[in-house]
Image (spheres, rainbow, N blue to C red):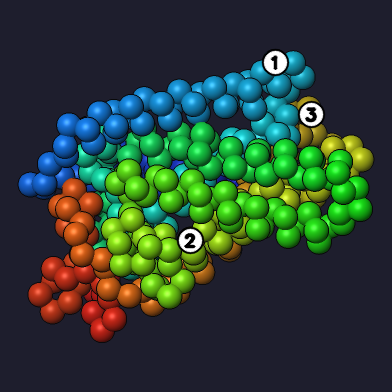
Amino acid sequence: MQLWAVVGATFITFEAVVLLRWVLGPNFKSTPPGPDQLTAGQHALYVAIQVAIPIAAAVCMYFWVVRPWWREGRLTTDGMLAISGAMIFFWDMSMNYTSVSLLYNSHLINRGAWANGAWPTWISPNANNLPEPLLVCIPGYTALVFSQVVFILWLIRKAKSRWPNLGTLGVIATIIVGLTIVDTIIETLLLRTGLYAYPGAIRGITLFAGRTYQLPLSETILFGGLGLGAIAALSYFRDDRGNTIVERGIDTLRLSTKGKQLVRFCAIFGAVHAAFLVFYMIPQQWFAVQSDPFPEGYPSYMINDMCVSGSDGNTCPGPGVPMPRP
């Protein structure tokens, strides 16, 4: 329990420092989209998306965090999981840590990214040009990402009522496979809108390979099946007191009620973010440096001067194309 709380406090401190350095640093500025323009239809779609996602996130947080807090008089375990899950937006751009594998549309409201100059040890150059969309990415991790965890937990409860002998391995398998499928469906639809793209992919394990909207299955398995799956498993498997595995032993601590709440939150935050570090960020680096050539056809507002590699310093990563290292 105490170890997970220390892990969580470490993650909270690190993420807060990186985000603060980004906000206060010279790279906190919008990424220019370049010469390529949007059509009227695209512009209308993106305005609607940037309005709808924050509203959906606010509604979700009300039902998952605020209302239970008012009812129970304290922040519940489910509320802590929801807040911790919402904060994994911090890891969103980690696909680009060693080499460019993720692009965003810079016509969306953005202030660049918390990479070079903010995140110590960041490797790939010009990663601060990634236009992390503030009204899509940050609230999207509540409305479009953690909602997948809520959905799969509902599905597991339905499955258990129908097949009561579904054991631990069956539950875990259902979580991993289910979240991989759900994330694949959601990302396939989002990629078609042109909000973002995964140009760096191994085509042999990629849906729609070679298209600008290609979807590497390494992403859906690592992000959805394993990353989100770990959160779902953490939430599902609880003791008779309703405690997750990282909360057990909380009653033995000589702390005030508020002190115990803080320790609980840090422990849950630590488990959620450690899962994304281990299951998503670290393995993604191998896939990033093994990617095939970028598909052709990305407009200037997707590339955003991030392809700084090759002998001419203006080539996108691919086989035989070296990425400069600091």
Packing grade of label 1 (10 A; few <14, some 14-19, many >=20) is few
Q: Is residue 277 left or right of residue 306?
A: right
- Residue at mark 2: 219
Q: Is residue 235 left or right of residue 42?
A: right
Q: Please state which of residues 240 and 154 is positioned toward the viewer in this rendering.
A: 154
Q: Is residue 276 visible?
A: no
Residue 98 in the image: above or below residue 195? below
Q: Measuring 36% from the left and 25% from the top, which residue is drawn there?
A: 51
| Contact (Cβ within 8 Å) of mark 3 with mark 2 | no
Q: CA distance from mark 3 to mark 1?
A: 20 Å
Q: Position of residue 216 (x, y in %)?
A: 44, 64
Q: Is residue 5 left or right of residue 187?
A: right
**Residue extending furthest toward the left:** 35
Q: Is residue 185 left or right of residue 46?
A: right
Label 1 SS: helix
Q: Measuring 45% from the left and 34% from the top, which residue is drawn there?
A: 139
- Residue at mark 3: 256
Which of the two labelled residues, at mark 2 and mark 1, occupies the earlier sequence position? 1
Packing grade of label 2 (10 A; few <14, some 14-19, many >=20) is many
**Residue extending furthest toward the bottom:** 320
Where is residue 47, by image quadrant?
A: top left
Q: Measuring 39% from the left and 54% from the top, which residue is drawn there?
A: 93
Q: CA distance from mark 3 to mark 2?
A: 42 Å
Residue 172 in the image: above or below residue 325? above
Tell me the number on the disc at residue 70: 1
Q: Amino acid at mark 3?
A: Ser
Label 3 SS: loop
